[in-house]
Amino acid sequence: MPRPKRPQSYYDDIKDKFQEERNLRLLYRPPGTDQSTSEFSGDLAKYAVDPYAEEVPSREPITDKVEVLFIGGGFSALLTSARLRERGIESIRIVERGSDVGGTWYWNRYPGAACDVVSYDYLPLLDELDYVPVNHYSRGPEIFAHCQAIADKYNLYELSVFNTTVTETRWDDADQHWHVSTDRGDVMRAQFVICANGTLAKPKLSTISGMTSFGGHSFHTSRWDYDYTGKNLEHLKGKVVGIIGTGASAVQIVPELAKTAKEVYVFQRTPSSIDIRDDWPTDPNWARKLEPGWQSKRRSKLFAAVENSLEKRAAKGAVSPEDKLKKQENANIDYMMRIHKRIDEIVDDQTTADALKPWYMFMCKRPCFHNEYLPSFNLPNVHLVDTEGEGITEISPKGPVFKGYEYELDLLIYATGFEVQQTGIYNDIVGQGGVNLQDKYSDGIRTLLGIHTAGFPNLFIMGGYQASFQFNLTEMLQTQGDHIAECIDHVRSNGHHTLDVTDEAEEWWVQEVIKHRGKTNRSEECTPGYYNFEGNEQRRQDGNYNGGFRQYFESQGEVREKMEENFHLAPKQS
């Protein structure tokens, strides 16, 4: 159905409204990422405790050597390990803070947890495991079980170390190995280290005055306390529950809370965009007819579909950059106004409906897809507390306080998210000559493909900055895992011991990142969120590569075609 023809003034007025809402957010609270903390010590230490781990047995410190060591046990580690196993590499260790593999799907076990990417595309290695997901969109328990199945198939549990946090990863110039220290006294040695700690791994809390004085029960969504709530939230009957945050986790949690809690208060700073999640059970007849290699073929088709044909690119090239940008912005605004219209059609109370409308461009914040979140606000026990961009700034012993009103709660849930794309989240990474990775990055992130960084031989980074960003993260991680496995295989097959990116190759990629960023002011004009460093100013190289996923994939291949040119490759020094 064609969009109605509207005058440009219509779109300009909405853009002005977007800017007003952004400026309102910037008036409140500390700037950027200073408005939250992920350092959970003292009274905040309880928010980091793993509720899913059984009693952790004591053990002797580990001081052995492995060929490949992964820091983190999520999809990054699992995907790459599978490819390494296929190349005959046996000595693989995962070191994981949790008590099992799974990464984000180990930690995020809150009620209603599900993935917003179609399961046949999101769940990796379906061909290899001969598995077809149960639904069009997978739920959290299925995804967690799939992670465990990958670890079983590729025998990754044998050398894995759980309930263990890496605290330092240091390159030993004399030994020519990485020495990996942990919070349990381990000093493991590894020829290759892969930072696979995930893009959203370290929980954070908003810095709110008085939060430690709250006398009720509280936890972060990634540390869900089922002992308190009950497996099916049956213990919440008769209880008043509050949840701070309205991002992806809260959108999935609120409808579940609404089914059992006496009252639910949703404390909103900035609304999310909520679109339809078109879900259904997998058709068994369709699944039965799938031929071997079906997922790889499906991904290839999707990969090709999102790329423009040469003809379309040529046609776009005939449009001036200003007109092209305006056309894109107008289409974006049309989409967001459809989101607004859907809210009006679903939410009965007009004041609540208006408060739930997101006033920013699509993809300024992580988009959400859910069919029950908006209808929840029609229930008599669900109440939206719209803080109009300010957020909750005070918590009393009884509960959150906003504009002088105290919300007395039995349970307060923090849906306040995670630190984003940090390479060493609990871990100091120290390369050749004692250089700390954060010191190297202090003047700007410098990598090749977001994977390699000069002066840190045999170190690989997954899911970090300067890599391509994809809403389906596993698709991008799969290309990185394939690339890393090829690099390690090249080192082993050609009698080398170390691989370190050249300064020239690193500089080339930094310039590629800069070239494909900053073409518009879109990020700066967005309302604060983790996609734009919460509104902090960014150096042009400190972000994702925006040259397109296909070009990122092709760049990986081009780098591997010229290994001797792009890397210092050296035998083990005697």
Image (spheres, rainbow, N blue to C red):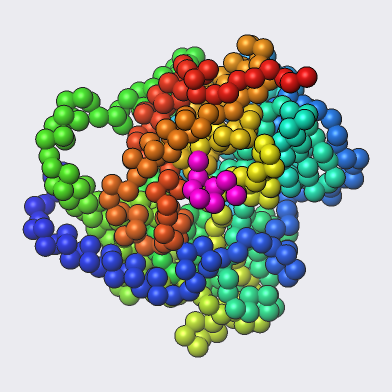
- What's the residue at 32%, 25% (across, down)? 304
- What's the residue at 13%, 42% (across, down)? 320
Question: Residue 35 versus residue 376: which sits nearer the camera?
Answer: 35
Magenta: main secondary structure = helix
Q: Which residues are magenta?
A: 439-446
Relative side of 420 to 178, left or right: left
- What's the residue at 63%, 38% (across, down)? 195
Image quadrant containing the C terminus: top right
Residue 51 drawn above or below residue 154:
below
Residue 409 drawn above or below residue 527:
below
Spot occupied by residue 181 in the image (x, y as percentages of width and height): 78, 42
Residue 78 drawn above or below residue 546:
above
Spot occupied by residue 241 in the image (x, y as percentages of width and height): 58, 70
- What's the residue at 28%, 64% (across, down)? 18
Residue 417 in sight here: yes
Question: Residue 91 versus residue 271: which sits nearer the camera?
Answer: 91
- Snapshot quadrant of residue 351: bottom left
Residue 372 in sight here: no
